[in-house]
Image (cartoon, rainbow, N blue to C red):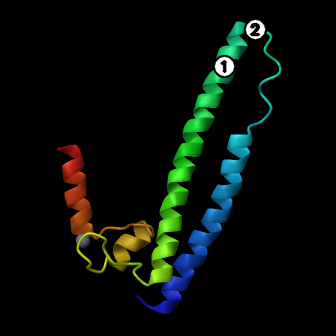
Amino acid sequence: MNKEKLESIKNELEDEKAMLEVKIDTLEQGEDFGDDIDSLEEEADESTEWQNQTAASQVLRERLADIDSALARMEKGTFGKCEECGEDIGMDMLQVNSTSKLCRSCKKLAREEENA
Ligand SMILES: [Zn+2]
């Protein structure tokens, strides 16, 4: 992979990371939805909302962890190599998912195992 391409992926990931951190902060600090419990129905709504927010922030945190790990691999110079077999992941895969840790064939195997 050439340096320019790597730099541009890195910039994109860093932008996305900054955006995610803001979103997670917003979600986890929550809007103030605790003080106005005046009916049971509303209380239930608020609890569902809280669960949704927690689930959403969980997804964002997982994405953030993927980005961190991709950035760490860039530091080490192993970005773009499959963690499983050490082959190049390939630009086509990275274009779809720049934080992918596996090459196409290892990813396929992992998916088959997951579904087994
Ligand atoms: Zn592989």
Residue at the image point whose x is 75% and y is 8% from the top: 39
Mark 2–mark 1 Cα distance, whole angstroms, equals 10 Å
* Residue hosting label 1: 45
Q: Where is residue 44 in the image (x, y as percent from the top left)?
A: 65, 15
Question: Disc 2 marks which residue?
Answer: 39
Asked if residue 88 lies left or right of residue 78, the reply is left
The one of 24 and 92 positioned closer to us in this rendering:
24
Q: Is residue 112 above or below residue 86?
A: above
Mark 1: C-beta under 8 Å from nearest atom of ligand 1: no
Point out the quarter of the image occupied by ligand 1: bottom left
Q: Which residue lies furthest to the left in this view?
A: 116
- The residue type indicated by label 2 comes to Ser
Q: Return the residue nearer the eye: 95 or 115.
A: 115
Relative image position of residue 15 (x, y in whole percent): 64, 69
Under circle 1, the secondary element is helix
Q: Looking at the picture, tell me which residue is in the foreground, 12 or 22.
A: 22
Which residue reaches farthest top? 40
